[in-house]
Image: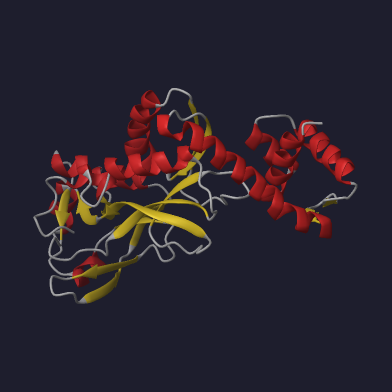
Protein backbone atom coordinates (compact mmCIF):
# COMPACT_ATOMS: atom_id res chain seq x y z
CA UNK A 1 0.00 0.00 0.00
CA UNK A 2 1.21 3.48 -0.88
CA UNK A 3 0.02 5.41 2.16
CA UNK A 4 0.29 8.80 0.49
CA UNK A 5 -1.88 7.72 -2.46
CA UNK A 6 -4.37 6.15 -0.05
CA UNK A 7 -4.58 9.29 2.08
CA UNK A 8 -4.98 11.47 -1.01
CA UNK A 9 -7.77 9.19 -2.25
CA UNK A 10 -9.54 9.30 1.12
CA UNK A 11 -9.42 13.12 1.18
CA UNK A 12 -10.70 13.30 -2.41
CA UNK A 13 -13.65 11.04 -1.54
CA UNK A 14 -14.55 13.17 1.48
CA UNK A 15 -14.32 16.44 -0.47
CA UNK A 16 -16.21 15.23 -3.54
CA UNK A 17 -18.72 13.03 -1.70
CA UNK A 18 -18.45 10.16 -4.19
CA UNK A 19 -15.92 7.51 -5.18
CA UNK A 20 -16.60 8.16 -8.86
CA UNK A 21 -16.04 11.94 -8.49
CA UNK A 22 -12.83 11.32 -6.54
CA UNK A 23 -11.64 8.96 -9.26
CA UNK A 24 -12.29 11.58 -11.95
CA UNK A 25 -10.52 14.21 -9.88
CA UNK A 26 -7.39 12.06 -9.43
CA UNK A 27 -7.46 10.58 -12.91
CA UNK A 28 -7.74 6.92 -11.87
CA UNK A 29 -10.45 4.28 -11.91
CA UNK A 30 -13.21 4.12 -9.33
CA UNK A 31 -12.04 0.66 -8.27
CA UNK A 32 -8.57 2.06 -7.56
CA UNK A 33 -10.02 4.69 -5.22
CA UNK A 34 -12.14 2.09 -3.43
CA UNK A 35 -9.15 -0.23 -3.02
CA UNK A 36 -6.91 2.54 -1.69
CA UNK A 37 -9.46 3.63 0.92
CA UNK A 38 -10.05 0.04 2.01
CA UNK A 39 -6.30 -0.53 2.34
CA UNK A 40 -6.01 2.63 4.42
CA UNK A 41 -8.80 1.47 6.71
CA UNK A 42 -7.14 -1.93 7.08
CA UNK A 43 -3.82 -0.26 7.87
CA UNK A 44 -5.39 1.98 10.51
CA UNK A 45 -7.59 -0.76 11.89
CA UNK A 46 -10.66 1.51 11.74
CA UNK A 47 -13.49 2.22 9.34
CA UNK A 48 -13.27 5.79 8.06
CA UNK A 49 -16.32 5.95 5.78
CA UNK A 50 -19.83 4.65 6.24
CA UNK A 51 -20.96 3.38 2.83
CA UNK A 52 -24.61 2.97 1.89
CA UNK A 53 -26.33 2.69 -1.48
CA UNK A 54 -27.38 6.34 -1.29
CA UNK A 55 -24.60 8.27 0.42
CA UNK A 56 -21.21 8.31 2.07
CA UNK A 57 -20.58 9.70 5.53
CA UNK A 58 -17.61 9.93 7.86
CA UNK A 59 -17.45 7.65 10.85
CA UNK A 60 -16.17 8.98 14.17
CA UNK A 61 -12.69 7.77 13.27
CA UNK A 62 -13.03 9.34 9.83
CA UNK A 63 -13.99 12.73 11.28
CA UNK A 64 -10.91 12.61 13.50
CA UNK A 65 -8.57 11.45 10.74
CA UNK A 66 -9.76 13.74 7.92
CA UNK A 67 -8.35 17.11 9.15
CA UNK A 68 -5.02 15.47 9.94
CA UNK A 69 -4.89 13.83 6.54
CA UNK A 70 -5.71 17.14 4.85
CA UNK A 71 -3.02 18.91 6.85
CA UNK A 72 -0.47 16.27 5.88
CA UNK A 73 -1.20 16.74 2.17
CA UNK A 74 -1.03 20.52 2.48
CA UNK A 75 2.26 20.37 4.38
CA UNK A 76 3.72 18.11 1.71
CA UNK A 77 2.59 20.43 -1.09
CA UNK A 78 4.01 23.41 0.76
CA UNK A 79 7.34 21.63 1.24
CA UNK A 80 7.50 20.78 -2.46
CA UNK A 81 6.70 24.36 -3.40
CA UNK A 82 9.40 25.73 -1.10
CA UNK A 83 11.96 23.75 -3.12
CA UNK A 84 10.65 24.34 -6.64
CA UNK A 85 8.57 27.50 -6.23
CA UNK A 86 11.37 29.87 -7.14
CA UNK A 87 11.50 28.40 -10.61
CA UNK A 88 7.72 28.98 -11.18
CA UNK A 89 7.64 25.74 -13.21
CA UNK A 90 4.01 24.80 -12.77
CA UNK A 91 2.83 21.25 -13.32
CA UNK A 92 -0.13 19.01 -12.58
CA UNK A 93 -3.83 19.36 -13.33
CA UNK A 94 -5.80 22.53 -12.66
CA UNK A 95 -9.60 22.25 -12.80
CA UNK A 96 -11.18 25.59 -13.67
CA UNK A 97 -14.90 26.49 -13.81
CA UNK A 98 -16.08 29.55 -15.73
CA UNK A 99 -19.28 31.07 -17.16
CA UNK A 100 -19.68 29.96 -20.76
CA UNK A 101 -19.60 33.25 -22.66
CA UNK A 102 -16.87 34.90 -20.59
CA UNK A 103 -14.86 31.71 -20.85
CA UNK A 104 -15.12 31.56 -24.63
CA UNK A 105 -14.60 35.27 -25.32
CA UNK A 106 -11.96 36.24 -22.78
CA UNK A 107 -10.68 33.44 -20.58
CA UNK A 108 -9.78 30.95 -23.32
CA UNK A 109 -7.56 33.42 -25.26
CA UNK A 110 -5.80 34.43 -22.02
CA UNK A 111 -5.24 30.80 -21.05
CA UNK A 112 -3.46 30.13 -24.34
CA UNK A 113 -0.66 32.48 -23.27
CA UNK A 114 -0.66 30.99 -19.78
CA UNK A 115 -0.30 27.45 -21.09
CA UNK A 116 2.56 28.46 -23.39
CA UNK A 117 4.33 29.91 -20.34
CA UNK A 118 3.74 26.72 -18.30
CA UNK A 119 4.00 23.70 -20.61
CA UNK A 120 3.91 21.23 -17.72
CA UNK A 121 0.43 22.34 -16.63
CA UNK A 122 -2.77 20.49 -17.58
CA UNK A 123 -5.93 22.61 -17.64
CA UNK A 124 -9.38 21.04 -17.23
CA UNK A 125 -12.13 23.59 -18.04
CA UNK A 126 -15.80 23.36 -17.12
CA UNK A 127 -17.81 26.06 -18.91
CA UNK A 128 -21.30 26.52 -17.45
CA UNK A 129 -23.34 29.57 -16.44
CA UNK A 130 -24.72 27.72 -13.41
CA UNK A 131 -22.60 27.70 -10.26
CA UNK A 132 -20.92 24.39 -9.47
CA UNK A 133 -19.96 23.05 -6.06
CA UNK A 134 -16.20 23.47 -5.99
CA UNK A 135 -15.56 20.92 -3.27
CA UNK A 136 -17.85 18.18 -4.56
CA UNK A 137 -16.65 18.50 -8.15
CA UNK A 138 -12.98 18.91 -7.30
CA UNK A 139 -12.69 22.40 -8.83
CA UNK A 140 -9.45 24.18 -7.98
CA UNK A 141 -10.56 27.62 -9.15
CA UNK A 142 -13.81 29.15 -10.39
CA UNK A 143 -14.54 32.44 -12.10
CA UNK A 144 -17.80 33.95 -10.88
CA UNK A 145 -19.49 37.23 -11.76
CA UNK A 146 -21.74 39.21 -9.42
CA UNK A 147 -22.81 38.69 -5.83
CA UNK A 148 -21.10 35.85 -3.94
CA UNK A 149 -23.16 34.04 -1.34
CA UNK A 150 -20.73 31.38 -0.09
CA UNK A 151 -18.55 33.06 2.55
CA UNK A 152 -16.51 29.88 3.04
CA UNK A 153 -14.71 30.58 -0.24
CA UNK A 154 -11.78 32.89 -0.91
CA UNK A 155 -12.74 35.48 -3.56
CA UNK A 156 -10.12 37.57 -5.39
CA UNK A 157 -11.39 40.42 -7.64
CA UNK A 158 -10.26 40.01 -11.25
CA UNK A 159 -12.20 42.56 -13.27
CA UNK A 160 -14.87 45.23 -13.07
CA UNK A 161 -17.99 44.20 -15.00
CA UNK A 162 -20.08 47.02 -16.48
CA UNK A 163 -23.31 46.74 -18.46
CA UNK A 164 -25.19 48.83 -20.99
CA UNK A 165 -28.73 48.85 -22.37
CA UNK A 166 -28.47 48.17 -26.10
CA UNK A 167 -30.67 47.68 -29.15
CA UNK A 168 -30.23 47.65 -32.90
CA UNK A 169 -30.88 50.72 -35.01
CA UNK A 170 -33.65 48.86 -36.83
CA UNK A 171 -35.43 48.09 -33.55
CA UNK A 172 -35.14 51.71 -32.37
CA UNK A 173 -36.45 52.98 -35.73
CA UNK A 174 -39.57 50.83 -35.29
CA UNK A 175 -40.20 51.29 -31.57
CA UNK A 176 -38.52 54.58 -30.71
CA UNK A 177 -35.54 55.31 -28.49
CA UNK A 178 -36.33 55.42 -24.75
CA UNK A 179 -35.26 58.65 -23.04
CA UNK A 180 -36.28 57.75 -19.47
CA UNK A 181 -36.17 54.42 -17.57
CA UNK A 182 -39.96 54.47 -17.34
CA UNK A 183 -40.24 54.28 -21.13
CA UNK A 184 -38.63 50.82 -21.03
CA UNK A 185 -42.02 49.48 -19.94
CA UNK A 186 -43.21 50.04 -23.52
CA UNK A 187 -40.38 48.04 -25.09
CA UNK A 188 -39.66 44.36 -25.74
CA UNK A 189 -37.20 42.89 -23.28
CA UNK A 190 -34.47 40.36 -23.98
CA UNK A 191 -33.76 39.06 -20.49
CA UNK A 192 -31.11 36.89 -18.86
CA UNK A 193 -32.91 34.08 -17.06
CA UNK A 194 -30.18 33.20 -14.52
CA UNK A 195 -31.07 36.33 -12.54
CA UNK A 196 -33.53 36.13 -9.65
CA UNK A 197 -35.94 38.49 -11.45
CA UNK A 198 -34.90 38.72 -15.13
CA UNK A 199 -37.45 41.41 -16.06
CA UNK A 200 -36.44 43.78 -13.25
CA UNK A 201 -33.71 46.16 -14.43
CA UNK A 202 -32.05 48.41 -11.87
CA UNK A 203 -30.62 51.73 -13.10
CA UNK A 204 -28.72 54.53 -11.35
CA UNK A 205 -28.67 58.10 -12.67
CA UNK A 206 -25.75 60.54 -12.63
CA UNK A 207 -26.76 61.82 -9.17
CA UNK A 208 -26.90 58.34 -7.66
CA UNK A 209 -30.68 57.99 -7.64
CA UNK A 210 -31.92 54.45 -8.03
CA UNK A 211 -34.76 53.22 -10.26
CA UNK A 212 -36.05 49.67 -10.75
CA UNK A 213 -38.01 49.10 -13.94
CA UNK A 214 -39.90 46.02 -15.10
CA UNK A 215 -39.60 45.46 -18.83
CA UNK A 216 -42.10 43.36 -20.84
CA UNK A 217 -40.64 40.00 -21.82
CA UNK A 218 -40.07 39.12 -25.48
CA UNK A 219 -37.28 36.56 -25.08
CA UNK A 220 -35.64 34.96 -22.05
CA UNK A 221 -32.47 32.82 -22.16
CA UNK A 222 -29.68 31.67 -19.88
CA UNK A 223 -26.97 32.64 -22.37
CA UNK A 224 -25.79 36.18 -23.04
CA UNK A 225 -24.53 35.43 -26.55
CA UNK A 226 -27.98 34.32 -27.65
CA UNK A 227 -29.57 37.47 -26.22
CA UNK A 228 -26.97 39.62 -27.95
CA UNK A 229 -27.70 38.04 -31.33
CA UNK A 230 -31.42 38.56 -30.74
CA UNK A 231 -30.77 42.25 -30.05
CA UNK A 232 -28.67 42.55 -33.22
CA UNK A 233 -31.53 40.93 -35.15
CA UNK A 234 -33.88 43.67 -33.91
CA UNK A 235 -36.02 41.46 -31.67
CA UNK A 236 -35.86 43.71 -28.61
CA UNK A 237 -33.81 45.70 -26.15
CA UNK A 238 -31.16 44.05 -23.97
CA UNK A 239 -29.26 44.80 -20.76
CA UNK A 240 -25.88 43.29 -21.64
CA UNK A 241 -22.48 43.13 -19.93
CA UNK A 242 -19.95 45.02 -22.01
CA UNK A 243 -17.63 41.99 -22.11
CA UNK A 244 -20.29 40.44 -24.38
CA UNK A 245 -21.60 43.49 -26.28
CA UNK A 246 -18.46 45.59 -26.79
CA UNK A 247 -17.63 44.49 -30.33
CA UNK A 248 -21.22 44.89 -31.55
CA UNK A 249 -21.33 48.39 -30.05
CA UNK A 250 -17.99 49.49 -31.48
CA UNK A 251 -18.83 48.27 -34.99
CA UNK A 252 -22.33 49.82 -34.92
CA UNK A 253 -24.47 46.68 -34.86
CA UNK A 254 -25.88 47.78 -31.48
CA UNK A 255 -26.60 51.23 -30.08
CA UNK A 256 -26.38 52.03 -26.35
CA UNK A 257 -29.44 53.86 -24.99
CA UNK A 258 -30.11 55.67 -21.70
CA UNK A 259 -26.39 56.33 -21.34
CA UNK A 260 -27.02 58.72 -18.43
CA UNK A 261 -28.44 55.77 -16.47
CA UNK A 262 -26.06 52.97 -15.53
CA UNK A 263 -26.79 49.50 -14.19
CA UNK A 264 -24.87 48.71 -10.98
CA UNK A 265 -21.26 47.71 -11.53
CA UNK A 266 -20.44 44.07 -10.77
CA UNK A 267 -17.18 42.20 -10.24
CA UNK A 268 -15.63 39.08 -11.71
CA UNK A 269 -13.96 37.04 -8.98
CA UNK A 270 -11.52 34.16 -8.86
CA UNK A 271 -12.96 31.84 -6.22
CA UNK A 272 -11.36 28.88 -4.50
CA UNK A 273 -11.93 26.83 -1.33
CA UNK A 274 -10.73 28.38 1.89
CA UNK A 275 -7.57 26.60 2.98
CA UNK A 276 -4.36 27.62 4.65
CA UNK A 277 -2.28 26.44 1.71
CA UNK A 278 -3.14 27.29 -1.89
CA UNK A 279 -1.30 25.42 -4.69
CA UNK A 280 1.18 27.53 -6.63
CA UNK A 281 -0.62 26.86 -9.92
CA UNK A 282 -3.78 28.47 -8.51
CA UNK A 283 -1.99 31.52 -7.07
CA UNK A 284 0.03 32.12 -10.24
CA UNK A 285 -3.06 31.83 -12.48
CA UNK A 286 -5.02 34.29 -10.31
CA UNK A 287 -2.23 36.88 -10.54
CA UNK A 288 -1.99 36.32 -14.29
CA UNK A 289 -5.72 36.92 -14.77
CA UNK A 290 -5.61 40.06 -12.62
CA UNK A 291 -2.98 41.46 -14.97
CA UNK A 292 -5.01 40.42 -18.03
CA UNK A 293 -8.27 42.09 -16.97
CA UNK A 294 -8.30 44.51 -14.02
CA UNK A 295 -10.53 47.46 -13.12
CA UNK A 296 -10.41 48.92 -16.66
CA UNK A 297 -10.57 45.80 -18.84
CA UNK A 298 -9.76 46.02 -22.52
CA UNK A 299 -13.37 45.35 -23.58
CA UNK A 300 -14.45 48.70 -22.04
CA UNK A 301 -12.00 50.74 -24.13
CA UNK A 302 -13.91 53.29 -26.18
CA UNK A 303 -17.25 52.62 -24.43
CA UNK A 304 -17.01 54.93 -21.42
CA UNK A 305 -15.67 58.38 -20.68
CA UNK A 306 -13.01 59.01 -18.06
CA UNK A 307 -15.53 58.71 -15.25
CA UNK A 308 -16.00 55.02 -15.92
CA UNK A 309 -19.17 52.98 -15.54
Whether residue 85 appears in this view of the structure is: yes
Left or right: 176 with respect to 187? left
- Taking 42 as reference, is 271 left or right? left
Q: Residue at coordinates 25% horizontally, 55% vertically from top-left? A: 162
Q: Which of the pair 294/125 is nearer the observer?
A: 294
Q: Position of residue 200 (x, y in %)?
A: 34, 68
| 83 with respect to 33 (left or right) | left
The colouring scheme, among rainbow, by chain, secondary structure or one colour, is secondary structure
Q: Left or right of 37: which side holds 77?
A: left
Q: Position of residue 115 (x, y in %)?
A: 40, 27
Residue 29 appears in which quarter of the rendering? top right
Where residue 233 appears, as percent x and y from the top left, is 25, 43
- Relative to 304, does residue 204 appear above or below in the rendering? below
Say above or below: 12 vs 26: below
What's the residue at 41%, 26% (across, down)?
118
Q: Position of residue 102 (x, y in %)?
A: 36, 43
Quadrant location of the N terminus?
top right
Q: Which one is in front, 10 or 239?
A: 10
Residue 59 visible from this viewpoint: no
Amino acid sequence: MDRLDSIESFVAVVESGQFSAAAERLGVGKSVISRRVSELEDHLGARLLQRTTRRLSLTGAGREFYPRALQLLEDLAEAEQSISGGQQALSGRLRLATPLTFGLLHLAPALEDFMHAHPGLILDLAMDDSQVNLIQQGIDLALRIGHLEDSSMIAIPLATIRSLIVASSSYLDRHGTPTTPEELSHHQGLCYSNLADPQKWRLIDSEGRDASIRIPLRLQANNGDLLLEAAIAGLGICLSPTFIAYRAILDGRLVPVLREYRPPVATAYAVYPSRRFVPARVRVLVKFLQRQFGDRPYWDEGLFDGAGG
